[in-house]
Amino acid sequence: MSVRVVARIRPLLEKEHGKDVIVRADSVEEGKPLTIVKIPSPKNESEEFSFAFNGVYEQSTTQEELFTAEVAPHIKALFQGLDVTIFAYGVTGTGKTHTMRGGLKLAERGVIPRLLSNVFRRGKKIAKDTDGDTTVQVALSYYEIYNDKVFDLLEPPEKRTPSGLPLREKDGKTIVVGLSERSCEDLKDFEKLYIEANNNRVTASTKLNAHSSRSHAILRVKVTQTTGDMVRESTASAIDLAGSEDNRRTDNGKERLIESAAINKSLFVLSQCIDAISRGDKRIPYRESKMTRILSLGQNNGITIMILNLAPMRSYHLDTLSSLNVSSRAKRIEVREIENEIVFKQPPRTNSSGSTNMQRQPLRPLANAHNIHSGAAVAAKASDKPVKAFSVFTDKASKPAAPARVPISTVNTSQLRRSSSNKRPSDSSEQIPRPSKLARPTHTSLIRPMATQLAPQPAMQPTPQQLTISAEQIEAMVEKKVAEILASRAAAAAPVPKVDIAPESSGLSESQISDEVRRRLDALERRIDNDTHDGRSEGLRLLLQARQAKERGDDEAALHFYELALPSFPGQAKLLSKIERLRAKIATKKGGDDSLSAPSAPRGDTRKVERRRDRAYKVRDDREDEEDGTEADVDDESFVDRPNRLKAARKQKNSGKKSAFLDMDQGSVSPRTKQLLDIVNSRDLALIRGLHGFGAKKAQDLVDHLTLKGDEEFVSVASLSHLSMIPGIGSRTVERAYEGLMA
Ligand SMILES: Nc1ncnc2c1ncn2[C@@H]1O[C@H](COP(=O)(O)OP(=O)(O)OP(=O)(O)O)[C@@H](O)[C@H]1O
């Protein structure tokens, strides 16, 4: 099913009485449930926008009504082995914490205490119904993401390290390293723990909300059911996201501004992820923030409910529209409901007739599985849906030793049908030999053009025959498959006008050039595929994207990706010169200088001239890449930090005309640079306007530029140089903004 998205409109608070209410709930037809949110157009009051949701809860909805309708029905599924995720999203002061945590009075309790109460009650019932044969244990982890750092809320604040807990990718899942977990006996136990932990959470008073949450809080409730030697584990995650806020309305001071920039940035990235997934994009920008990395929206299996909190007043008009836009798109995210497997505490007796058991494979997280689908393919192929949303993990070994895994007896046939076709052998399954990456059968879904594109794999057991395929054969098959993928990509792309400038002087024919480029792209993709845990793999991936953008003729995107890759290869001379060349090329293009290598065109036929010029650039670029070997940067070791290269690059930079100040950010990013970039990337007009040298117009131009770019792909400003290249900004402005932060 899709992510279930429901909207909740909060009532007016005492101090808000008499305020203009502009948000209302409606239904498609009279008598039908409320599923529509209506809000007037900010430009034309007589025009009304409607946003459809899976459910809409109006101002008078009580905590109990919301819980009974949206969360209670999934408790059963949780005990059947499905993970359940509930998260509250919305602008600051719209009722997220009220919805998730609620008040202390019984009637005011929010989703979280009610969830725990139901879990304990059901656990007790199961134990009673089975005469104690099945025991249910509940364990909690609770942490916050504050200023893009992860802190354990179950530990006292003095135990925090300034950099917070690190994240690590393990088996395709993001885990928080060193997170604590506490077992919880009953509701009282939970309440004590929860209240204590919430005192550790960072909140502050802003003009919009007296207790504004300055962090995203993630509560993870692990339910472990043990019957004899069988253990079933599932997790409910309840997430109270920090609210986006308009700093013009919050009168935020410096510290609040920084927090606000971090919050706004992560929420912006979340919206970009939602957009990218719903469009079927290949690249989902999870890694741009810790929150999205942990949530990995659209990645795991189970049930996800997004509660959009809305304030009904006019003063929230634009913010409300923006969050309505984002959340209504989240409905398009498809998730699979696949229950977690049962594991045995001890090795089961061998059963010669147990072949059916063997067919049910332990689940693996299908990281970025949506990446293999285009949006249309997703729609057309409902049975092959991308996998679901949020899941959070501790790194503790949570399961008992699991020498064998068995099918879940309670699974219904539709679940089985759905899940079995998408299972693949687990890396961690010791007793079932898993073929090495190279030796896997060449099934279309097994060929992944990029490391992140982990395709769901059929529950196939390797046969001895498959395992004996030679490395050369596999390599040939991979080459063939990648060639097919590249060919289909090329066919899908807009037709590129034929190059009418002969590339003789490059020494290579056009087809040879593209063969050569393709060979390197293939090599890079394979390398990334084999190298996901290398810190440089993200950099390599960006280089690949840059190269692909260049191939498409999209120089600005190429420049953007090269710049994003820079921090992974600080001071790398070839990369720097590549960036310089692209900048010059873009600047020349913008200046309308079409004299470079382009043959003259008939007067007035400027498009033709531009096309020719682009082709000329392409041929020249390819030639330059061949000549200086920069293309090889992606598949040789030349991007490894080398002191000599670094020195050479610095020398080159210092001798250039460009501002020495801007060169500062070519290597590692200083905290002040990061602060400046965070403010810029928040796209928060008020924050940006607060920077030295940025008046209202410049700030607006910058936000417009980033927003327009953002419609095409996720764009964040990666460096001060990048910032200075944005039309209307320039190096002097960047310098002033930077110096302003120093003051
Ligand atoms: N449904 C509701 N009924 C009554 N009061 C509500 C409701 N929703 C929110 N409120 C009140 O509105 C105020 C703001 O709510 P809350 O703190 O939950 O907002 P928030 O979205 O979590 O804000 P932030 O993102 O700043 O943490 C609180 O005083 C809360 O008690």
Image (tube, grey):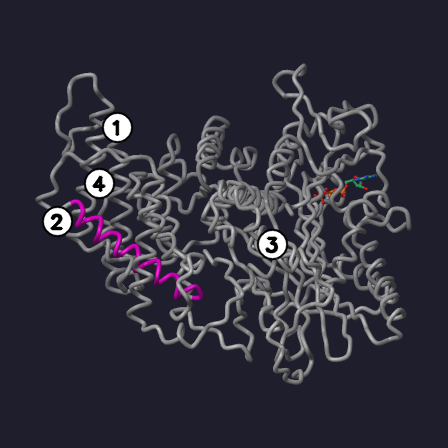
CB under 8 Å between discs 2 and 4: no
Is residue 739 something one can see in this rendering?
A: no
CA neighbours of label 3 inside 10 A, class few (<14), some (14 to 19), many (20+): many
Query: In terms of sequence position, does the residue under pointer 1 or pointer 2 come before the other?
Result: 2
Estimate the spatial distance between the alpha carbons at disc 2 and disc 4, rounded to whole Å: 13 Å
Query: In terms of sequence position, does the residue under pointer 1 or pointer 3 come before the other?
Result: 3
The disc label shown at residue 618, or none: 4
The amino acid pointed to by label 3 is Leu
Residue at image mark 1: 591
Query: Which tag is nearer the camera, tag 2 or tag 4?
Result: 2
Estimate the spatial distance between the alpha carbons at disc 1 and disc 2, rounded to whole Å: 30 Å
Estimate the spatial distance between the alpha carbons at disc 1 and disc 3, rounded to whole Å: 43 Å
Q: Secondary structure at mark 2?
A: loop
Q: Secondary structure at mark 3?
A: helix
Query: Which tag is nearer the camera, tag 1 or tag 4?
Result: 4
Whether the magenta-drawn stretch holds residue 529 is answered as: yes
Magenta-colored segment: predominant secondary structure: helix
Image quadrant of residue 475? Answer: bottom left
Q: Is residue 297 left or right of residue 505?
A: right
Picture quarter with ligand 1: top right
The disc label shown at residue 508, or none: 2
